[in-house]
Image (spheres, rainbow, N blue to C red):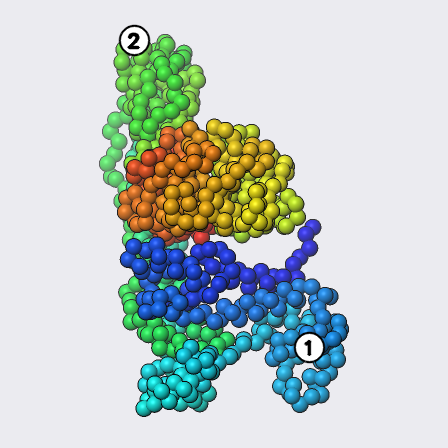
């Protein structure tokens, strides 16, 4: 059994989770604060502004715009609380191995550290611990043992509160100009703010701090209101579901009395009830999303301001005061209490029909006819609306002939129309609403004919694509998704550090659970693919390598290491197998290129470099192959898809930034179907766009949210032979299946 992580390791993991930028996935560099209180790297925000046609800055997570100061992104408020987390991270790394800690106070010794001083932020030995107790200069210092540090390190590491320097005079800014609302130094006072009202920061900080905290009062009340409303909405959701269930029982009890006659009507009413209930739940889900956004904004506001006041220096806090108070005021003023009123109630009712059955023409038959059937054409593939012809050898021509089409994924039944064409031939037509593997059942006189049920592969027309037929929940940050020859669903769960394999119906079968950094283990799996032998290829970005497993989960090969040389990676995230030559293509996010490996995983070549020209990439995210062997690469920050020959020669591109038809917004996933259709997942638009291989727009589906058919970062796409689409919905921790 694996050894349980220490408290320091668990705390380190939690801190590191807060230190990664959601855009570049790397530790923050120059973290900057947006008006929605979300934080990103300065260079990532500059990239967003540079690639926005209007030069605007929108938060990648909540889409709220942030006004840019005259100096651009660099003029945004620095998220100084993040620097405190980096200090905690460095100290935690030391605590992970306390036996190797040496005293950080002693100059020329290797005495073992046994304690930690919160004020000095250093690990000290027994001798220095005694000095802290005896010397007056250390009076008031909090010294604790390493064991206590490990249990409560985050609280014990004190924030470094330093006075900021004046950019004009390189002096500490110890004064606050009440007239301008700015921090100033003494030279500023003499030359610029001479006649203004000012005070010493230390003297005025408490009153301004109180003003900031007082402004949070309405936000706290709004957060409490959103919390209460979310609880009520959950209760309302349960009531509607329960009420729908009770109505279903009532419907069933009524139809049991006249089941044979009213069976069809029962199905119609159940479908109507389901549609009505789902519509109510969809409306409730949309309202919940609105309230969650209100809750997130206010929670982020409260957390950031309080943490900033706790961890920042008086100068830092006053420097941000005006902007924060303004943003808080905007939150309060834009709050609409009407959003908290539930929009749906349990006002649906079932009214049973009073009409009696007068006649039942076909109640059954006496005897069993001998029936055989031969399809006159193959029933392997059809569109959602279609027909087929069957030829019968029937000893009882007067017997009734009935047929129905059943979708295997949902058990949804479609009644078929049977028309006699003469000479023992019948035409069976159907219009199912669900695509995928189905079965055609044919009965003559109540008896299934020989060969029934017949397999039918129902393909969904592109204009009807977008209906959720199944959802696989409770995954941990699913990224890549792939299908093997048996149509088992293979999902890379990034946060769990595993690859899970599910049956075609979504039942979990097995797991590639080799978490760790040793050879053959995975730390951060993000991309998966299947080769011609049904072997599973996994890209492990955390360990910068590519792994190959058998279908059953046995490790076959491991290639790659951290670097930029041949066969080395810097944050690889996706993998694809070329459908023609069998070569393996790996997207290297950090180096802005695609590596090509032979089928035995020996390095072949690579193509691409950082930029926006033809054949260049700006954070490539995914790669796919069409049936001719051409490679399609998602060029994320350039908002496009580029097409290459199998050896990496540039051919063409399509897509531009936007949210209209045929436009792309930070595309992150791609799949090319055998019908030459290209499916592209967009992080910016939270949707899947369907295009031709030449980039002609056909269809898009999805929007931002957590309801059925909505996405929060669609990071992986796979499509089966019937056109059923599997989308990994990262921040919603699920895979949705569409037809």
Residue tagged 1: 105
Relative to 249, does residue 139 appear above or below in the rendering?
Answer: below
Q: Nearer the viewer, residue 401 or 140?
A: 140
Classify the position of the C terminus by image quarter: top left
* Element on which disc 2 rests: loop
Task: Indicate the position of residue 191 as horizontal and vertical percent values.
Answer: 36, 87
Q: Is residue 587 left or right of residue 333?
A: right
State which mark lies toward you, 1 or 2.
1
Can residue 116 be seen in this snapshot? Answer: yes
Check disc 1: other Cα within 10 Å, few if <14, some if 14-19, many if 20+.
Answer: some
The image quarter containing residue 249 is: top left
Q: Is residue 145 visible?
A: no
From this view, report whether residue 545 is shown above or below residue 208.
above
The residue under the point 46% across, 74% down is 308
Which image quadrant is residue 214 in? bottom left
Comes first in the chain, label 1 or label 2? 1
The label on residue 423 is 2
Horizontal and vertical percent position of residue 112: 74, 71
Residue 601 position, x and y percent, is 58, 36
Identify the disc placed on residue 651: none
How many numbered badges does the structure rendering display?
2
Left or right: residue 486 versus residue 395 is right
Residue at 47% x, 71% y is 80
- Residues tagged 1 and 2 counted as in contact (Cβ below 8 A): no
Q: Is residue 342 left or right of residue 438?
A: left
Q: Residue at x 37, y 81 (%)?
A: 182
Q: Depth check: 603 or 242 in front?
A: 603
Q: How far apart in space, not on screen, are marks 1 and 2 (Cα)?
A: 101 Å
- Residue 118: horizontal and vertical position, in percent? 62, 77
Vertical order, 343 against 716 (above or below): below
Q: Residues within 10 Å of mark 2 (few under 14, many from 20)?
A: few
Observer-nearest residue: 193 or 263?
A: 193
């Amino acid at each position: 059994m694996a050894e349980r992580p220490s408290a320091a390791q668990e705390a380190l993991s939690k801190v590191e989770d807060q230190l990664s930028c959601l855009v570049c996935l790397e530790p923050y560099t120059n973290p900057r604060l947006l008006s929605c209180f979300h934080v990103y790297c300065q260079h990532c925000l500059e990239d967003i502004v540079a690639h926005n046609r209007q030069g605007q800055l929108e938060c990648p997570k909540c889409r709220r715009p942030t006004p840019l100061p005259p100096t651009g992104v660099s003029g945004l408020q620095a998220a100084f609380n993040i620097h405190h987390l980096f200090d905690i991270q460095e100290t935690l790394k030391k605590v992970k191995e306390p036996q190797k800690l040496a005293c950080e106070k002693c100059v020329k010794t290797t005495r073992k550290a046994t304690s930690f001083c919160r004020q000095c932020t250093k690990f000290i030995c027994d001798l220095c611990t005694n000095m802290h107790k005896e010397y007056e200069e250390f009076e008031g210092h909090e010294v604790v043992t390493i064991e206590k540090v490990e249990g409560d390190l985050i609280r014990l590491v004190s924030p470094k509160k330093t006075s900021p320097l004046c950019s004009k005079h390189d002096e500490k800014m110890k004064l606050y100009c009440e007239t301008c609302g700015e921090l100033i130094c003494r030279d500023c006072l003499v030359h610029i703010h001479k006649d203004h009202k000012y005070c010493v920061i230390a003297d005025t900080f408490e009153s301004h701090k109180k003003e900031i905290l007082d402004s949070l009062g309405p936000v706290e009340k709004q957060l409490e209101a959103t919390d209460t409303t979310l609880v009520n909405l959950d209760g309302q959701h349960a009531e509607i579901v329960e009420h729908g269930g009770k109505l279903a029982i009532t419907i069933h009890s009524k139809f049991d009395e006249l089941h044979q006659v009213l069976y069809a009507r029962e199905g119609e009413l159940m479908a109507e009830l389901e549609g009505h209930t789902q519509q109510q739940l969809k409306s409730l889900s949309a309202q919940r999303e609105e309230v969650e956004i209100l809750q997130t904004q206010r929670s982020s506001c409260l957390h950031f301001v309080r943490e900033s006041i706790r961890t920042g220096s008086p100068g830092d806090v006053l420097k941000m005061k005006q902007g924060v108070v303004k943003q808080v005021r905007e939150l309060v003023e834009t709050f609409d209490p009407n959003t908290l009123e539930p929009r749906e109630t349990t006002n649906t009712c079932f009214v049973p029909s009073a009409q009696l059955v007068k006649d039942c023409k076909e109640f059954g038959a006496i005897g069993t006819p001998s029936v055989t059937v031969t399809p006159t054409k193959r029933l392997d593939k059809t569109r959602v609306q279609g027909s087929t012809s069957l030829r019968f050898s029937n000893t009882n021509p007067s017997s009734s002939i009935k047929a129905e089409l059943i979708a295997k994924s949902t058990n949804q039944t479609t009644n078929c129309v049977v028309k006699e064409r003469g000479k023992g031939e019948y035409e069976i037509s159907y219009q199912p609403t669900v695509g995928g593997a189905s079965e055609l059942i044919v009965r003559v006189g109540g008896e299934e004919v020989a060969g029934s049920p017949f397999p039918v592969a129902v393909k969904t027309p592109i204009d009807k694509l977008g209906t959720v037929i199944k959802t696989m929940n409770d995954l941990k940050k699913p990224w890549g998704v792939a299908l093997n020859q048996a149509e088992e669903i293979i999902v890379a769960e990034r946060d769990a550090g595993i690859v899970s394999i599910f049956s075609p119906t979504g039942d979990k079968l097995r797991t590639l659970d080799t978490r760790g950094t040793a050879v053959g283990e995975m730390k951060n799996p993000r991309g998966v693919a299947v080769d011609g032998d049904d072997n599973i290829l996994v890209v492990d970005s955390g360990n910068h390598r590519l792994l190959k497993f058998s279908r059953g989960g046995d490790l076959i090969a491991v290639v790659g290491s951290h670097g930029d040389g041949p066969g080395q990676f810097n944050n690889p995230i996706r993998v694809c197998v070329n459908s023609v030559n069998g070569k393996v293509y790996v997207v290297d996010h950090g180096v802005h290129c695609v590596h090509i490996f032979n089928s035995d995983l020996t390095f072949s070549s690579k193509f691409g470099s950082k930029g926006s020209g033809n054949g260049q990439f700006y954070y490539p995210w995914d790669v796919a192959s069409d049936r001719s062997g051409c490679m399609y690469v998602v060029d994320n920050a350039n908002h496009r898809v580029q097409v290459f020959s199998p050896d990496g020669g540039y051919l063409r591109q399509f897509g531009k930034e936007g949210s209209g038809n045929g436009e792309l917004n930070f595309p992150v996933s791609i799949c090319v179907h055998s019908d030459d259709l290209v499916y592209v997942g967009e992080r910016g638009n939270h949707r899947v766009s369907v295009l031709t291989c030449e980039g002609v727009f056909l269809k898009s589906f999805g929007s931002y949210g957590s309801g059925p058919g909505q996405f929060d970062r669609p990071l992986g796409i796979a499509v089966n032979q019937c056109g059923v689409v599997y989308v990994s919905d990262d921040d919603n921790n699920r895979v949705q299946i569409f037809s």
